[in-house]
Image (cartoon, coloured by chain):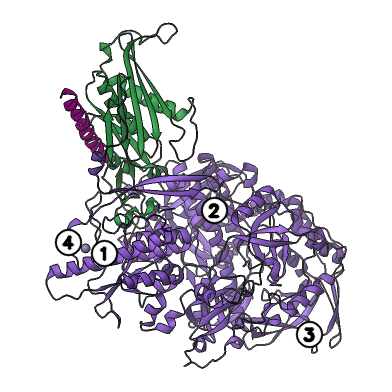
Chain colours: A green, B purple
Amino acid sequence: MPLDTSTYSLALLRLDGRRWNELRRIHAQISTQAAADGSSYLEMGNTKVICTVAGPAEGRTGGAARGGAGSEAKIEVEIGFAGFSGVDRKRRGRGDKRTAEMCHTLQTAFSSLLLTHLYPHSTISISIHILSQDGSVLAASINAATIALIDAGIPMSDYLVACTAASSPTTADDEVSDPLLDLNGLEEQELPFLTVGTVGGSERVSVLVMETRVRMERVEGMLAVGVQGCKRVKEILDGVVREYGKRAVR
Amino acid sequence: MTSLKRSFASDSSAPNLSNKVYVRSTKSGKVQKIVRELYLRQDIPCSSNLCSKCAQIAPTDYNNKVAPFVLSDTPAGTKAFPNGHYLVPDTNAFLTGMDLFEVETAFYDVIVLQIVLEEVKNRSLPLYHRLINLTKNEDKRFFVFFNEFRLETYVARDHGESINDRNDKAVRKAVQWYGEHLQEAVRARGKSLRCPSIVMISDDKENLRKAKAEKVPALSLSEYVSGLKDADLLLDMISAGREQRENKSGKGELFYPEYFSLSKMLTGVKAGTMHQGIFNVSPYNYLEGTVHVPAFDKSLLVLGRENSNRAVSGDVVVVEVLPKDQWKAPSTKIIEEETLNKNDNADAEDGETIVSERERRALQEEVKRVHGQSVEGRPQPTARVVGIIKRNWRQYVGHVDKDSVRSSSKSSRSQQTVFLVPMDKRIPKIRVRTRQAGELLGKRVLVTIDSWDRDSRYPVGHFVRSLGELESKGAETEALLLEFDVQYRPFPKTVLDCLPAEGHDWKVPKSLEDPGWKGRKDLRDLLVCSIDPPGCVDIDDALHARPLPNGNFEVGVHIADVSHFVKPNNAMDKEASMRGTTVYLVDKRIDMLPMLLGTDLCSLKPYVERYAFSVLWEITPEAEIISSQFTKSVIRSREAFSYEQAQIRIDDKSQNDDLTTGMRTLLLLSKKLRQQRMDAGALNLASPEVKVQTESETSDPVDVQTKKLLDTNSLVEEFMLLANISVAGKIYEAFPQTALLRRHAAPPKTNFEELGNQLKVKRGMEIRTESSKALADSLDTCVDAKEPFFNTLVRIMATRCMMSAEYFCSGTQAYPEFRHYGLASEIYTHFTSPIRRYADLEAHRQLAAAIDYEQLDPSLHSKAKLEAVCKNINVRHRNAQMAGRASIEYYVGQALKGRIIEEEGFVMKIFSNGFVVFVPRFGIESLIRLRDLGTPEPESEFDSENYVLNVTGSRNVKVELFQKVKVRISDEQEKSTGKRKIRLALL
Ligand SMILES: [Zn+2]
């Protein structure tokens, strides 16, 4: 096995050679599936995600799932993990709690971001497939969903972009800990981290999820770095969208 | 549909991205393929102070700090490298020569490559940690260069190339790059600076050959060391294993069976056909080992060299149980390595057999013994070692066997192989190759075992350093500390930096508004005093008692508030947690915390104000607890008594001040508490405690006395127990999963079988063990009207049948398992000695959080972290006790040196060729062998059922268990261990 995160302090280098404030390579494409209303493919390092958006569509017939009640569109989110996405070949069932929580996070975040009042009695469904997991899965899902929604032409107030931030392990002698940006899978297993999502790369935080314990005084640094990271993710995604727009016009 | 395949165009934006793919197999046998990204970069500095270019690209951390450059601009040189040099060792260099890299006379300016660090970690975690510690040692200037992340030094693995070859290539590449980079750097500075050479150190012949071909400066470890000043001394420190293997490969004689593969063992253990446990060697018989495994009540016996198959005491082994017809009774004979294999030649490579003829005979005699009916004689399951899960080798202290040295001339520099005899009798002799045999004779030396191959009867090791002359106080004390792994170096600066800046002038703040007073009760008006052994300077605890209007009493135990000064996770806390406990030797104390805290700021000294953590109870005159309360406080102790002074003050009828009355109240209550405890079944066990009186100037031992126990001793003890129990309840209530507690398991019935049978056969007495109460009661009945000491003797022997108490984290055990058997308490912890025990400090933190005084540090929330802490302090605690005992033993030996005394003793164990006598006056026990009784060695007849040894021949005497005997005590230097030891002779 290679080294672990405790070697960060030796040369301020992370397990994959990045510095504390560097994102992994982000690669994104939109309109990857012609059949869908909107679609995208996004890689953050080795985390690979496909997202398709259907709708807004009039509520399906029959049953309780009849569109959004009242004057706003209802947003449905579905996340599926491919059996081969992790290191172990494992099926994550539909009833998986963590998956359900991720769906819920996306749903609430986008409900307040999309201009849902424009589409009363209808449904927008976002379907995400995780092809490969290597950390920051929730963040990647949010980013992929954002550009797929743009591809679908659904009006929204601004980009919702997300990334993760962690706190590096402290060394024996000093208390100093660096916040680390955009974790890969190994770092996620070893370090306390949070996922932060901001609107339009500004400082308006709309998603904040943290499931691990961390010293209170470190949160501020993690959050600051996370918000900075979001700003950069926004620039990259914005570039992808504009590039696609240019090509579509041509 | 658009292709999802990444276009090459998008890749070109990241030319410095590479993937690392590797396959690993998990414990359960699954194979996982792991793909990891690698970001290659050009801004990783070389960290040489010669280079100004790298200084500009040095990375900054979140706080904009730049790590200082490590490598010196004027590194030391050797004859071959007059311009100075930086070393780049490869993995094997570290694996075989870690001791060398740690010496203080050489090996500075070392570049540790990432790939090497990684490989060292895979091969040996302890060595990895030592290497990491070296990189943190500023004086040694070890720099970790992340060669795998630097674009120029990254090498891809060629098709068909083995991983090892690729890694060797990476090392050479890094050496090459460093060389060119430094030359450039020196040229850039323009001045006529010397450009240091970059030297690769490797023991791999192929790698060295390739390096030569590529014109990379490279040397083998021994070649390099030969060019240094104290080459002879240093050469001995290279691990022996490798070299010797090369020497011997030719002769293929294998003495020991091969170990099973790990997977075979794991499957076997899972299936129940094999068992895993810790290998222990009997202190009386080096050929008899035991392994306790869950599947068997009694420990499995491992007899003889072949069966123990290179296991060393302390190793975690896997054993296979032998067929029932090979089950044997444990030995009743003393077998010592030194007497059997005196004449083995350390150099012998031919004609060496695994079991020497004498060993075989000694064992056969054992087997011939009729399997009697007594418990001791009943055959026990035997087993053989089939593999090792984990070696527990450490550094061993010992001395060079005089007889194994070929040429003992001090000037001889020829290399020879000698035997090193470890101080610990359970460890086999170690073969060591050295060029300084002559100089090492008569010295205490430190060695490590490197390997134990199938073709070598003894393990092979290498010499680390000499501690000094045998029997000199310095060497013996250091030997003892090393043997018990006591960290005795002075506290490093990082630790001392954590102390309050005011130093000895620190005072409890005057103003009650000061943050230090927040949440503290002002208890300065209470008449508090402390009672300790005479001369005690680290006063952990103080007490008070005063009557309440309702007729009850308020009693307070005040404990030094160490957690106020030692904050979790700082350097001082880390050091204390590693040390675990203060170690008390006869003439020396090795502190857990720096002196400033232990003996001054924390110590509850009289007449000054001190921070404390107080436990306050309301207690009825019948010693029933009405309520308890915990609070941080400030106290002012009125007096520090010794046990004796306190006793005199209490007994002095003319003293009737409030302080004395308070002490009388405490004494009265403590007696009732004690009675309650005894009624509940607490055990009153005995261990021989002696005190060595030393002349204060020279600390030479003058006399030995057994310790006296006064009422005031138990006064303090009772209230400390009470405080510990109260606190244990409180922290468990607050943190049911992570409270740090102490438990004492009930001894398994089989532990008492032997003692019970001995008492039954010899005295018609009975020991009952179904509960601690029953045991306590039955121990009370074991009295001999004519011999008052008999009861104590039985208690001493009973103590040895007990389990040892241990610290644990509450979430790891079910509540019934919390029980402290010896104290007959449901729950218990250590709270009252935070200055000298780390467990107490952690309990303080948990209690402070339980009463909402402060937030609990996350490390105390984590079960895994607490478990690690418990594991360490359990070991440290045990080692400290053993070190203390060994120190007393050494000083008793010194005190009796040259004297001959006749004393009474008691026979406490009988073998077929000797017996053990305990001398109460000095608290010593020693073996009297048959051959000590007369020459020629007398004949003996051993009646194992009645524990009688009939000696006839040159001496006619009958010895039986529990018999009172007269012995002559003299001293001798024990040949096998080099220790000065008591020698007893039967009169
Ligand atoms: Zn440089």
Highlighted range, magenta: A224-250
Q: Residue furthest toward the front?
A: B160
- Chain assignment, label 4: B
Q: Amino acid at mark 1?
A: Trp
Callout 2: helix, strand or loop?
loop
Asked whether mark 3 and ligand 1 are closer than 8 Å, the reply comes as no
Q: Which residue is mark 2?
A: B830
The reply to whether callout 3 and callout 2 are in contact (CB within 8 Å) is no
The CA span between labels 3 and 4 is 80 Å
Q: Amino acid at mark 3?
A: Leu
- Of pointers 1 and 3, the one earlier in the residue sequence: 1
Ligand 1 sits in which quadrant?
bottom left
Where's residue B616, x and y in %? 51, 47
The CA span between labels 1 and 3 is 73 Å
Residue found at x 34% / y 64%: B171
Callout 1: helix, strand or loop?
helix
Where's residue B806, x and y in %? 59, 54
Badge number at residue B177: 1
Where's residue B270, x and y in %? 65, 48
The CA span between labels 1 and 2 is 57 Å
Please identify, in this view, whether the residue under mark 3 or under mark 2 is nearer the observer: 3
Judge left or right: residue B112 versus residue B411: left
- Of pointers 3 and 4, the one earlier in the residue sequence: 4
**Magenta stretch, main secondary structure class:** helix
Front in this rendered view, residue B699 or A26: A26
